[in-house]
Amino acid sequence: MVIGAVALSVRVAPFARPQYTANSQTITIGGVHSNWVGTCYVGNGFAFDTLAIQNAGVLSGVGSGYIGNNSGDTNNTAAVSGTGSVWSNTASLYAGANALI
């Protein structure tokens, strides 16, 4: 019998990768740690996509991060807000790599 115990559940998504399949999509990471392998694109061939990392959400990975990668990738955004929220890469973070910004 357990008295006064509190269960804490933390979801870790091993090797998850933000995927956008159309315009105007949002991926929100909040209160969890998500790992990915490879490059993270926010709007790779799409417009008006959003990555929101908030409320101690963490996105970390092996590779680079891109916010708008191609010439038609317009109005894509990434926002990291709240205490403990982080987006980290082992390589570079690019904003408008081959896109007009």
Image (spheres, rainbow, N blue to C red):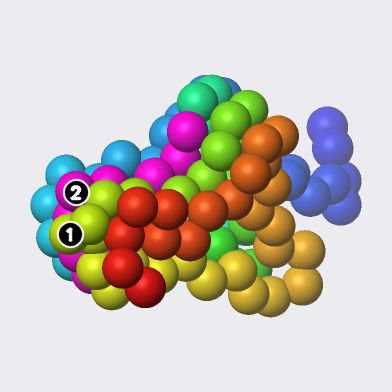
Q: Which residue is mark 1?
A: 72
**Labels 2 & 1 near each other (Cβ < 8 A):** yes
Residue 26 spot, x, y in % from top left: 31, 62
Question: Disc 2 residue type?
Answer: Gly
Which residue is found at the position 86% from the left and 52% from the top?
A: 4
Q: Nearer the viewer, mark 2 or mark 1?
A: 1
- Name the quarter where the C terminus is drawn: bottom left
Alpha carbons under labels 2 and 1: distance apart:
7 Å
Q: Secondary structure at mark 1?
A: loop
The amino acid type of the residue labelled 1 equals Gly
> In this view of the protein, can residue 33 be seen by the observer?
no
Residue bearing mark 2? 45
Circle 1 residues within 10 Å: few <14, some 14–19, many ≥20: some
The answer to whether 40 is drawn above or below residue 32 in the figure is: above
Query: Which stretch is magenta?
Result: 39-50
Q: Is residue 33 above or below residue 81?
A: above
Q: Residue at x 84, y 37 (%)?
A: 2
Question: Percent from the top left, x then y, of residue 45?
Answer: 19, 48
Is tag 2's residue or tag 1's residue first in the polypeptide sequence?
Answer: 2
